[in-house]
Amino acid sequence: MYTVNLNDMTQQEFLDKYWQKKPVIIRQGFKNFQDPICADEVAGLAMEAEVESRLVHKEGDKWQAAFGPFESYEHLGSENWSLVVQALDNFSEEAAEMIEAFRFLPHWRLDDLMASFATPGGSVGPHMDNYDVFICQGSGKRRWRVGDRGEHVEFAAHESLLHVEPFDAIIDDVLEAGDIVYIPPGFPHEGVSLDTSMSFSIGFRANSGVSLMSAFADHLIDNDLGKALLTDPDRQVVEHSGEISNNDFESLKGQLQGLLDNKDVLKGFLGNFLTAAKHELDIMLPDEPFDLTEVSNLLTSHAIKRLGGLRAFYFEDTVEQGTCYINGTELEFCQDIAPGVKLLCNQSMIFPDDLGDMAYNAAFVELVALLLNQGYWYLAEAE
């Protein structure tokens, strides 16, 4: 199990001082850190079609980038290239454990865990991100330069690479195994590998208002909602037919605002939207479907573990009414198993001791059987 060492800061002190405010290096944030996955395994994943990956290198002074899957890497030589694999938490149980160290942040903000392998001189170039990121150095060393937030000019160094023009560094240091650099959105940065190295990035993203509104509109259409027409039975004669009066503007705004003010509709959308998988899941279907008696017995002897990358959330004021959201779908359940559902959403692994009497609740056993048979949770040996 990974634990972040914040160097005499509490988690709240870190959030108060640095979160979305300024970058910081956390020396030995992971003590005695070892790569949870080796470079050859990362390279192997990048050969799979369902895994999102990217190669970045330079030919002379020109940046090059290509998207996987890849057949080989021999043509790249031994220097100046980098391989990035997205959503590593979906495909590596060991690597996904790193995310557990950041449970002091809400999981709905999580984007994914990214792995980066680089040869000496390898980099993806100077760039800015629109998300918060904790970059954890694995084997090898990388030099990181981070600039201040400001009016930085971005440009396309390649059709697949958005870079930022040269910047003055407020952080310029070398990270070794176990060191972590936290970088908020909008701070330009560049990491260059000093030798063959690995790094692991845990990203936290917030959606823009535009993306939320677009997805909300799709939700309304898909669910046949929001079709009521604007009505104005008390309409008065107008003097200027080309004018949109303040009263009409308020009516139109109210029509849109009414959709946002409908908490049931909005929560249904947000629950589905925020739990929808951002990358393809590596579903673990059982060899044979579990029956209820089998699951009831297993809950007292085995742990159950959530599939890597699977999202399961609830709203604090509706979970007790029997509603949660898993993998983009609203799930209704018996209200008296709400404590068990909270465990499923809050913990990636649940042990028999966590469940107490819930392990004998027929409704909870039925729900767990459904989730096991969907491949969303799977059995693990209880320690």
Image: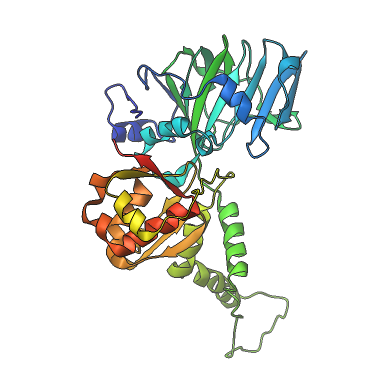
Seen in the picture, residue 38 relative to 244 is either above or below; the reply is above
Colour setup of the view: rainbow
Q: Position of residue 69 (x, y in %)?
A: 70, 32
Q: Is residue 137 left or right of residue 1?
A: right
Seen in the picture, residue 51 relative to 216 is either above or below; the reply is above
Tell me which residue sits at (57%, 61%) in the image: 216
**Residue 280 visible to an observer of this rendering:** yes
**Residue 190 visible to an observer of this rendering:** no
Quadrant occupied by the N terminus: top left
Q: Position of residue 375 (x, y in %)?
A: 49, 50
Tell me which residue sits at (27%, 30%) in the image: 10
Q: Is residue 65 left or right of residue 138?
A: right
Tell me which residue sits at (56%, 49%) in the image: 208
Tell me which residue sits at (35%, 18%) in the image: 31
Name the quadrant containing residue 2.
Answer: top left
Q: Nearer the viewer, residue 143 or 245?
A: 143
Q: Nearer the viewer, residue 335 or 136?
A: 335
Name the quadrant containing residue 102.
Answer: top left
Q: Position of residue 193 (x, y in %)?
A: 58, 13
Q: Position of residue 90 (x, y in %)?
A: 52, 39
Quadrant occupied by the C terminus: top left
Q: Is residue 131 left or right of residue 20?
A: right
Seen in the picture, residue 30 relative to 227 is either above or below; the reply is above
